[in-house]
Amino acid sequence: MTPTRPRFGARLAAAMSAHGPLCVGIDPHPALLAAWGLPDDADGLRRFALTTLEAVAGRVAAVKPQSALFERHGSRGVAVLEEVVAAGRGTGTLVVVDAKRGDIGSTMAAYADAYLRDGSPLAGDALTVSPFLGVGSLAPAVEAAAATGRGLFVLALTSNPEGASVQHAVAPDGRSVAAGVAAYAATRNAAELAAATADDGRAGAPRVDGRDGVVALGSVGLVVGATVGDAAARTGVDLAAVRGPLLAPGVGAQGAGPAELAAVFAGARGAVLASSSRGVLAAGPAVPALREAAARAAGEAAAALA
Ligand SMILES: O=C(O)c1cc(=O)[nH]c(=O)n1[C@@H]1O[C@H](COP(=O)(O)O)[C@@H](O)[C@H]1O
């Protein structure tokens, strides 16, 4: 099937090449709203998120609104999330909706409709998903993303210390859970890139061969926290073999910095999209200060991942 827009992997690789490997999280925590002098209500969320967009859109590769912090305010908060997704898409900056959805396949199809279907008000450019009901349960989302040129970021090695108890566990096939997730993404990305390579000669098709100086990425990314140390090696996750984007939260407020980024992703640095929320947002509410914080974080990530 021909996607309705260029592949997410190609669009993200081009955005990282143009703006550096940073995603700014839009996480309107109550404490940040207070620090910005905003009310903890839908209007506060709107002003917080639109100010952040004004500061960083067109200057970073992606933004990542955190759905939970909008859901706190019920339907009014979700309406603001829809407004933020639309505004983000309007700027051309890629929008990763961080909702970490995961369910049995038939319900996953409904989540795919909500977050990955053309015309859905909650559909950005990519969605975070949870594979812990079995990675195969994500198939409806994988298909919907492929059909519409959208992407997924599948949780693999999360930034929180509790994640290891599940993700490092060894599955019946002898692999760690995280390695199984990574292998699934690698298989999907290999197929996507092979098909895209076959299209390379056609007018307008994004290149995948690196000849335009952009790293070739598939559209099924992983989430690998910048805080996980040598967990990839210990769990048998081959980050380079994934050939998809690696979203790396944990930068800034959770303690990871350039040294951790460089160490965790050695061998796959060109695929990494470092993600920082509070580390950038704490500089607000002034737009120039937010812009400077994002530029600093992007510069540090670029240097660490060069
Ligand atoms: O999927 C995510 O983005 C994510 C995965 C993960 O392993 N750890 C993690 O922190 N996140 C999200 O990334 C953001 C981190 O925020 P800061 O710690 O403020 O930079 C939050 O929205 C988290 O929900």
Image: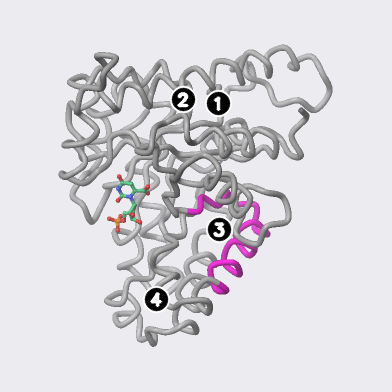
User: Of callouts 1 and 4, which one flags the residue occurring earlier in the amino acid sequence?
Assistant: 1
> Which secondary structure lies at badge 4?
loop
- Nearer the viewer's eye, disc 3 or disc 1? 1
Amino acid type, label 4: Pro
Q: Which residues are magenta?
A: 79-97
Identify the residue shown where x is 39% and y is 64%: 68
Marks 1/2: CA distance? 9 Å
Height in image: 208 above or below 254? above
Q: Secondary structure at mark 1?
A: loop
In this view, 230 is above or below 225: above
Determine whether the residue tagged by mark 2 lies in a helix, strand or loop. Answer: helix
Where is residue 150, by image quadrant? Answer: top right
What residue sits 55% from the left and 22% below the top?
A: 216
Residue holding disc 4: 285
Choose between 145 and 270: the one closer to the eye: 145
Amino acid type shown at disc 2: Ala
Cα distance in 3D space between marks 3 and 4:
15 Å
Disc 1: which residue: 218
Q: What amino acid is at disc 1?
A: Gly
N-terminal-most mark, 3 or 4: 3
Q: Position of residue 242 (x, y in %)?
A: 43, 21
**Residue 241, image x and y in percent?**
41, 15
Calculate the distance from the C-alpha at mark 2 to the C-alpha at mark 4: 38 Å
Secondary element type, mark 3: loop
Residue pointed to by mark 2: 185
- Which residue sits at x=46%, y=60%? 65
Q: Nearer the viewer, mark 1 or mark 4?
A: 1
Cβ atoms under marks 3 and 1 closer than 8 Å = no
- Answer with left or right where residue 49 lies relative to residue 191: left
The image position of residue 148, as x and y in percent, is: 69, 39
Q: Which residue is mark 3?
A: 57
